[in-house]
């Protein structure tokens, strides 16, 4: 029998031809359009994420529900996989055991009908989300696309499309599995809804992300805008929608894999910076600002720190790092922004980050140097009373290992919030010798507590001398060693010991 007459061989050849129609080689014109934009194809992004040989794809042969208006053969290639690659692959394989690397992947394909979401597209989303939920798999989702697709004509029993469950199912994964969203290019309407719901959001500088695209905005009578005017990256980096800005898709993929690694376990190999000069990173004058990121990079394993929402809520720095290979979530006061006073943006950013760490069992390290919460009439107009206190709610729910290190200022409600609610909320609260404690900032406390006494001194120089004396006395009473003597904190440590103390705490906590 001739090989071409072998029915099994015919089946295999037909299968291979069908698979080819979904590949970049089989969709050469679409691939070339992506290259002309300087973008990757969806399958190139897949290959950068994981070994495609072991990738288990779901719904590869789906096509758009448009067989009534288009030729089925052309749909197989033109609407390959109905615009979304879904499946399970292994991310960071070789760095962690295979049982910890399995990841659900959703990669929107903009070369298919501008990445819009059609009937079978949503069914594929629903299917992979359910797989992730059942198997407790983290999810990485690429969200590029134009939102809902009005051109699907095959499903005649659907009118509004509001029965779609993809958005609620995606949201139902919150707190169940880590969800990382990556965007490049245009991301509007339903695609943006998925992006914004993720736990960690990464977007390239080419991204424009909005809850409606130009056509919907114009249709609503809200004016005419180009896609580039809707939700550019500069806007979303500053308002907190985007956690990390990437240069391009390749960079975004590296960031996504790195972020995912903190949820996958400990690493065996790490390096550390010399610790002997860490105290010198703090200025001698307590009134001067400094770069706390230098302290973070010195304390944490070399090249392990990644910051989230760097351009938003800058009074608190949030991010992931490692200590001797162990993953932690780190929060740190940033005195270069508002003197470290916690405003509403910083508070909400920090609260969300603490909740993320709690949800997925990641220990928390807090570096505290704050004069307290930001106050004043202008800040109250922003809802400070409600929004600042989200930090207390998040801190109260922490059951993960939690260690706090006071670097310098530890004042008022803001400091308590940085410590999860009080100096006794962390499992271990320590301070550098430079730590200073009080119910409010020293200057304010002296001015308020001794207002009448100071007002009675007529000579301005004499009044200032008296103020400075009272300020020095308040400083001495609030020094770390004095606070430790009445057991309000657990220890005062030499700064050079900080990294080892944090690392040993984490090791001990893991054995409990």
Image (cartoon, grey):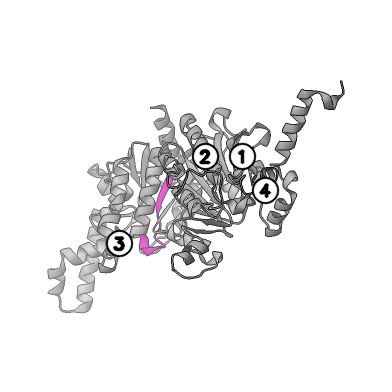
Q: Which residue is mark 3?
A: 374
First in residue order: circle 3 vs circle 4: 4
The answer to if 393 sits in the magenta stretch is: no
Counting from the top left corner in percent of width and height, residue 39 is at 66, 54
Q: Residues within 10 Å of mark 1 (few under 14, many from 20)?
A: many
Query: Distance between the Cα atoms at labels 1 and 2?
Result: 10 Å
Secondary-structure class at tag 3: loop
Task: Count neighbours of disc 2 (C-alpha within 10 A) and say few if under 14, some if 14 to 19, many if 20 or more.
Answer: some
Q: Please state if 88 lies on the left or on the right of 448 as rendered.
A: right
What percent of the width, then of the height, locates residue 318? Answer: 43, 51
Q: Considering depth in this image, is 222 or 272 the residue closer to the camera? A: 222
> What residue is pinned by disc 2?
123
Q: CA distance from mark 1 to mark 4?
A: 11 Å
Mark closer to the chain start, 1 or 2: 1
Q: In the rendered view, does 490 fall on the left or right side of 269? A: left
Specify the farthest residue to the right. 2
Distance of mark 1 from mark 3, alpha carbons? 54 Å
Secondary structure found at label 4? helix
Residue at the location (58% across, 36% down)?
A: 87
Asked if the residue at tag 3 contacts the one at tag 1, i.e. Cβ–Cβ closer than 8 Å, the answer is no
Q: Which residue is mark 4?
A: 78
The magenta stretch spans which residues?
330-340
Q: Is residue 208 found left or right of 412 in the rendered image? A: right
Marking on residue 62: 1
Q: Name the image quarter holding residue 412.
A: bottom left
User: At x 28% / y 48%, what residue is drawn?
Assistant: 392
């Amino acid at each position: 029998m001739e090989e071409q007459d072998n029915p099994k061989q015919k089946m295999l050849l037909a299968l291979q031809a069908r698979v080819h129609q979904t590949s970049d080689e089989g969709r050469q014109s679409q691939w070339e359009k992506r290259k002309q934009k300087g973008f990757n194809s969806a399958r190139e992004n897949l290959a950068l994420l994981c070994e495609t040989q072991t990738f288990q794809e779901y719904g590869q042969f789906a096509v758009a529900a448009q067989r009534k208006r288009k030729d089925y053969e052309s749909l197989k290639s033109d609407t390959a996989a109905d615009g979304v690659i879904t499946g399970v692959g292994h991310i960071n394989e070789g760095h962690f055991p295979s049982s910890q690397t399995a990841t659900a992947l959703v990669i929107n394909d903009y070369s298919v009908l501008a990445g819009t979401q059609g009937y079978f597209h949503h069914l594929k989303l629903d299917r992979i989300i359910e797989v992730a939920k059942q198997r407790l798999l983290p999810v990485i989702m690429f969200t590029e696309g134009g939102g809902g697709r009005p051109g699907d004509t095959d499903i005649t029993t659907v009118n509004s499309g509001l029965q779609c469950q993809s958005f609620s199912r995606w949201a139902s994964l919150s707190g169940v599995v880590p969800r990382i969203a990556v965007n490049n290019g245009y991301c509007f309407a339903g695609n943006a809804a998925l992006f914004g719901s993720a736990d960690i959001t990464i977007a390239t500088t080419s991204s424009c992300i909005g809850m409606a695209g130009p056509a919907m905005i114009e249709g609503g009578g809200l004016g005419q805008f180009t896609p580039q005017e809707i939700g550019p990256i500069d806007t979303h980096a500053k308002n907190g929608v985007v956690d990390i800005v990437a240069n391009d898709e390749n960079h975004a993929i590296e960031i996504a894999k790195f972020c995912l690694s903190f949820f996958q376990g400990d690493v065996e190999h790490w390096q550390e910076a010399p610790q002997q000069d860490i105290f010198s990173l703090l200025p001698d004058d307590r009134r001067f600002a400094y770069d706390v990121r230098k302290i973070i990079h010195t304390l944490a394993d070399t090249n392990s720190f990644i910051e989230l929402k760097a351009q938003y809520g800058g009074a608190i720095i949030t991010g992931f790092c490692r200590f001797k290979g162990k993953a932690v979530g780190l929060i740190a006061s940033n005195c270069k922004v508002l003197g470290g006073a916690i405003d509403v943006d910083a508070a909400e950013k920090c609260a969300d980050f603490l909740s993320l760490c709690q949800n997925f069992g990641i220990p928390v390290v807090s570096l505290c140097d704050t004069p307290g919460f930001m106050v004043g009439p202008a800040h109250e107009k922003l809802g400070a009373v409600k929004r600042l206190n989200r930090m207390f709610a998040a801190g109260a729910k922490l059951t993960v290992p939690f260690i706090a290190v006071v670097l310098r200022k530890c004042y008022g409600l803001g400091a308590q919030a940085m410590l999860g609610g009080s100096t006794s909320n962390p499992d271990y609260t320590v301070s550098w010798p430079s730590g200073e404690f009080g119910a409010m900032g020293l200057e304010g406390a002296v001015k308020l507590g001794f207002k009448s006494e100071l007002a009675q001194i007529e000579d301005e120089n004499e009044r200032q001398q008296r103020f400075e004396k009272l300020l020095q006395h308040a400083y001495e009473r609030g020094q770390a060693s004095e606070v430790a003597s009445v057991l309000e904190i657990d220890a005062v440590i030499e700064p050079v010991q900080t990294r080892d103390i944090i690392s040993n705490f984490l090791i001990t906590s893991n054995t409990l």
